[in-house]
């Protein structure tokens, strides 16, 4: 039977829906009067980590020196020095890159103006020093000092929340041996498992017995003040306000919501017109679509147009996939699997849609900082759409005509359907968001600088994931890592999309013939890959997700931490959307993401993780709008 794997299909659609909604002056080394590095400056900190010796896992500290200096070449450089061969691993380097990226967005500074060096004594790897390294880079840029008797453990998320880590009891022991008096740990991890005993211990109590104060922190602002005694600067005038669609966009979003609801009804008619036995395997998708359609109508009647648009998209997408899958089942049974392959090998409508979208994007010239993010947003959808088509083509072209794999063909069909929707959503973004806002468009060189920063961060995340997950599975199974990558790409679609968005950039930039369009394409693809790759790190390392036998997410081991991450992500998004508006932008897309995140937060665990991603993307896009406006000013 030509069927869609239920758990994998739903996971893929849910994750993609994170992106299926709505679809500046020159470089400067200061922000709002705060002067950053004008000459080489250094700071030394001591991250805590784990060593495995004869007695098992033991906590220890590592001397790490961070140097920041002006870069006359205006090209980002991040270097890693080590005192031992192979002293730093890919996870540690990912932490370093993340520290640089977060410093750039938090301070609104173009870090292409600087050169960063991280010098490590000894052997160290792992992402758990991400938050400490971010604080260290920030402190050097701001001329503050990290207290010498303090350290911390915790990852750093794209919105500044501190992500959970493991082995905290051992790390507290290591900090005590290293003479530390204060250890910051992620909020929600006061009670954690001791690696040696396997028992859950009270980390605050353990610290007291060792003469160390252990304190939970939830975000970069709390942690920075605790470690330096200084407040981390925030954008001037930042306020916590509920995001709302600008009046200029309300009617446009309303019109798009109507269009998608009409498409949903048409696909529903197509689906119901098929013979029952072909529909039956996909009726669960139809039920999901109908539920989303009902919610879309409800939100529409309440005037919640962003939510109505998001749910109308969801309804259409699920129903389209149900309808197309049932049609392909019909073809497979009546004409054979070979006919399905032939149909998929024919020119797919999405190719024409992508070509038209590229032609449109090449001639669009941003007039405002809002336009800049609208274009980047459209390129986000375009990059994912092309990436999915390439994945589908790869599957189709690798199938021997005499023995097509039905399971592989259905995945290819799903990729084509999703790519088609993404291309339509990209056009929506342009129709709704262009020619809004009042702040001038950013200098292309500065925009390109931020794009390259995010691209490198995404690649660092993917390298980390390969090291900690892919390589580990390959060793255990005795297979080549490429085999595991192929399997994982079919099972975890955050990984699929993170790869697709970044891998397509070279060919897309070549197709755009370089220049300003290529810079926007890089920013769009990097935004997508950065968010999806950050989600991978959060899922597999920070939150420690739990799966059932079918591979569906059923829970997280660190639920309290996830709740805190969602709370902060929601608050941060409200603040940054308000800031984007104050700096002369119309943050339409971030508002739509925000409403979608609020809706998904009330759902099952898959939806909660999607909610977190939507909050992250909304806050980052809003923050970039503010930075690119030229009105981003920091105050303490």
Image: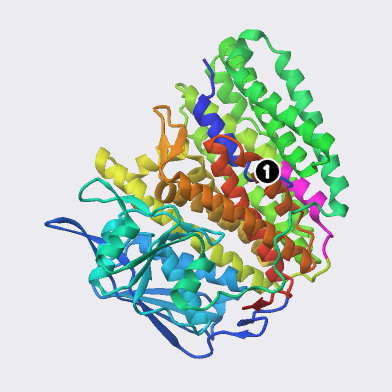
- The mark tally for this picture is 1
Q: Which corner quadrant of the image does residue 585 belong to?
A: bottom right
| 481 or 600, nearer to the observer | 600
* The residue positioned farthest toward the bottom in the image shown: 39
Residue 254 against residue 232 in the figure, above or below: above
| 524 or 387, nearer to the observer | 524
Magenta highlight: main SS = helix
* Residue 575 on image: x %, y %: 68, 61
Task: Write the residue at 50% across / 34% down.
Answer: 395
| 238 or 588, nearer to the observer | 238
Task: Write the residue at 40% across / 51% down.
Answer: 465
Local secondary structure at mark 1: helix
Confirm whether the magenta stretch covers residue 187: no
Q: Which corner quadrant of the image does residue 293 belong to?
A: top right
Q: Using a 10 Å C-alpha cutoff, classify the residue at mark 1 as few (fewer than 14 neighbours), some (14 to 19) or many (20 or more).
A: many
Residue 441 against residue 406 in the figure, above or below: below
Going by the image, does 582 lie left or right of 165?
A: right
Q: Which corner quadrant of the image does residue 296 belong to?
A: top right
* Residue 112 on image: x %, y %: 55, 76
User: For the magenta stretch, what is the residue range?
Assistant: 424-437
Task: Write the residue at 35% across / 51% down.
Answer: 191
Task: Write the residue at 66% across / 33% down.
Answer: 347
């Amino acid at each position: 039977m030509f069927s869609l794997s239920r758990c994998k299909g739903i996971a893929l659609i849910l994750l993609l829906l994170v992106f299926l909604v709505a679809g500046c002056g020159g470089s400067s080394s200061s922000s709002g009067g705060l002067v950053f590095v004008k000459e080489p400056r250094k700071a030394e900190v001591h991250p805590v980590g784990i060593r495995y010796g004869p007695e098992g896992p033991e906590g220890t500290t590592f001397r790490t020196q961070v140097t920041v200096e002006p870069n006359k070449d205006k090209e980002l450089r991040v270097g890693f020095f080590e005192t031992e061969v192979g002293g730093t691993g890919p996870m540690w380097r990912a932490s370093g890159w993340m520290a640089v990226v977060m410093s750039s967005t938090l301070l609104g500074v173009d870090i292409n103006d600087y050169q960063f060096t991280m010098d490590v004594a000894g052997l160290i790897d792992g992402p758990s020093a991400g938050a400490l390294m971010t604080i260290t880079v920030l402190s050097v840029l701001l001329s503050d000092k990290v207290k010498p008797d303090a350290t911390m453990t915790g990852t750093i998320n794209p919105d500044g929340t501190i992500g959970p880590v493991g082995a905290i009891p051992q790390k507290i022991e290591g900090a005590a041996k290293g003479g530390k008096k204060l250890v910051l740990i992620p909020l929600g991890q006061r009670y954690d498992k001791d690696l040696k005993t396997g028992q859950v211990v009270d980390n605050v109590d353990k610290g007291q017995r060792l003469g160390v104060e252990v304190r939970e922190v939830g975000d970069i602002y709390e942690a920075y003040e605790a470690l330096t005694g200084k407040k981390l600067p925030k954008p001037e005038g930042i306020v916590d306000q509920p995001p709302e669609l600008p009046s200029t966009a309300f009617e446009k979003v309303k019109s798009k919501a109507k269009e998608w609801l009409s498409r949903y009804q048409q696909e529903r008619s197509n689906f119901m017109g098929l013979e029952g036995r072909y529909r039956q395997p996909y009726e669960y998708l139809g039920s999901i679509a109908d539920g989303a359609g009902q919610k879309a109508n409800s939100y529409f009647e309440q005037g919640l147009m962003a939510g109505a648009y998001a749910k109308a998209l969801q309804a259409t997408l699920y129903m389209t996939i149900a309808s197309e899958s049932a049609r392909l089942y019909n073809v497979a049974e009546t004409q054979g699997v070979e006919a399905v392959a032939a149909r998929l090998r024919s020119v797919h409508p999405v190719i024409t849609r992508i070509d038209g979208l590229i032609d449109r994007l090449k001639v669009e010239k941003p007039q405002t900082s809002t336009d800049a993010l609208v274009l980047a947003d459209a390129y986000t959808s375009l990059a994912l759409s092309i990436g999915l088509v390439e994945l589908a083509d790869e599957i189709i072209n690798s199938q021997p005509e005499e023995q097509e794999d039905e399971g592989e063909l259905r995945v290819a069909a799903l990729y084509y359907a999703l790519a088609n929707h993404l291309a339509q959503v990209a056009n929506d973004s342009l129709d709704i968001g262009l020619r809004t806002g009042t702040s001038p468009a950013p200098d292309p060189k500065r925009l390109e600088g931020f794009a390259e920063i995010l691209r490198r961060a995404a690649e660092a995340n993917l390298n980390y994931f390969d090291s900690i997950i892919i390589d580990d599975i390959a060793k255990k199974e005795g297979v080549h890592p490429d085999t595991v990558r192929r399997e994982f790409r079919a099972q975890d679609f955050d990984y699929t999309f993170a790869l697709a968005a970044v891998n397509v950039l070279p060919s897309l930039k070549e197709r755009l013939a370089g220049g300003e369009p290529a810079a926007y394409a890089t920013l769009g693809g990097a935004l997508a890959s950065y968010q999806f790759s950050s989600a991978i790190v959060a899922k597999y390392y920070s939150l420690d997700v739990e799966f059932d036998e079918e591979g569906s997410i059923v829970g997280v081991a660190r639920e309290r931490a996830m709740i805190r991450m969602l709370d902060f992500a929601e608050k941060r998004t409200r603040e940054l959307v308000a800031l984007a508006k104050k700096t002369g932008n119309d943050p339409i897309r971030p508002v739509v993401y925000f409403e979608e995140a609020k809706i998904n937060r009330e759902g099952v665990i898959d939806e909660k993780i999607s909610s977190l991603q939507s909050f992250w993307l909304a806050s980052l896009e809003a923050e970039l709008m503010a930075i690119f406006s030229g009105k981003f000013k920091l105050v303490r």
